[in-house]
Amino acid sequence: MNGQLTTFTLAAHSYGLPVQAVQEVLKEHVSTPVPLTGDDVRGLMNLRGEIVLVLDLRARLSMPERSTGAPPMGVVVRVDDEPICLLVDRINDVINVTEDMFEASPDNLDGPNYELIRGAYKLPDRLVLALDVERAVTEAR
């Protein structure tokens, strides 16, 4: 895919989402917990009159909980025209990518984390894992 990715960090790993999937980025958010939900559901939030589900990508990807120091940031994505806030450790920059930078995930990788990663973009200074946003959100519901 040629285009742009919004990048973010989770547990020292870089991830990317297509810019067109991102509605907005939130530095702060307030959510209301919802009882009897999975560990990855952090609650619901009111975003300018629209109720938005808040998912913690760390929990979704089976990563350890973030340290109590810095609060998470939110990336609001639209999936099936529904806004969903994904909690991440830090929002990074928007990068330009080309098809020749992309390499699909090896077939021998398995587990829930690998189903959510389409592959990786090889940049000069790092790898950016391409998150399948539709699958990450759908699998969490």
Image (cartoon, rainbow, N blue to C red):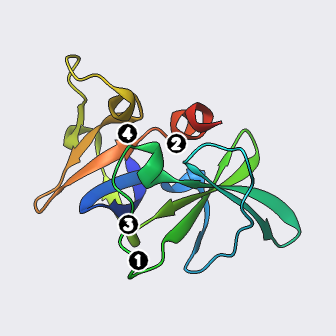
Foreground residue among 95 and 52: 52
- Mark 3 vs 4, N-terminal side: 4
User: Which residue is drawn at the image coordinates 34% and 55% (left, top)?
Assistant: 64
Q: Are marks 3 and 4 in contact (CB under 8 Å)?
A: no
Question: Residue 55: image x %, image y %?
Answer: 59, 53
71 w.r.t. 126: above or below: below
Foreground residue among 53 and 33: 33
| Labelled disc at residue 68 | 1
Q: Mark 3 or 4, which is nearer the eye? A: 3
Q: Residues within 10 Å of mark 2 (few under 14, many from 20)?
A: many
- Mark 1 vs 4, N-terminal side: 4
**Quadrant position of the N terminus in the picture:** top left
Q: Mark 1 or 4, which is nearer the eye? A: 1
Residue marked by disc 3: 66
| The image quarter in which residue 113 lies | top left
Foreground residue among 93 and 27: 27
Which residue occupies the extreme front position in the image?
Answer: 36
Residue marked by disc 2: 133
| Element type where label 4 sits in the image | loop
User: Which residue is drawn at the image coordinates 38% and 43% (left, top)?
Assistant: 62
| Element type where label 1 sits in the image | loop
Question: Residue 69: image x %, image y %?
Answer: 38, 82
- Mark 1 vs 2, N-terminal side: 1
Q: Are marks 1 and 4 in contact (CB under 8 Å)?
A: no
Task: Give the residue type at disc 3.
Answer: Arg
- Tell whether 118 sits left or right of 44: left
Residue marked by disc 4: 1
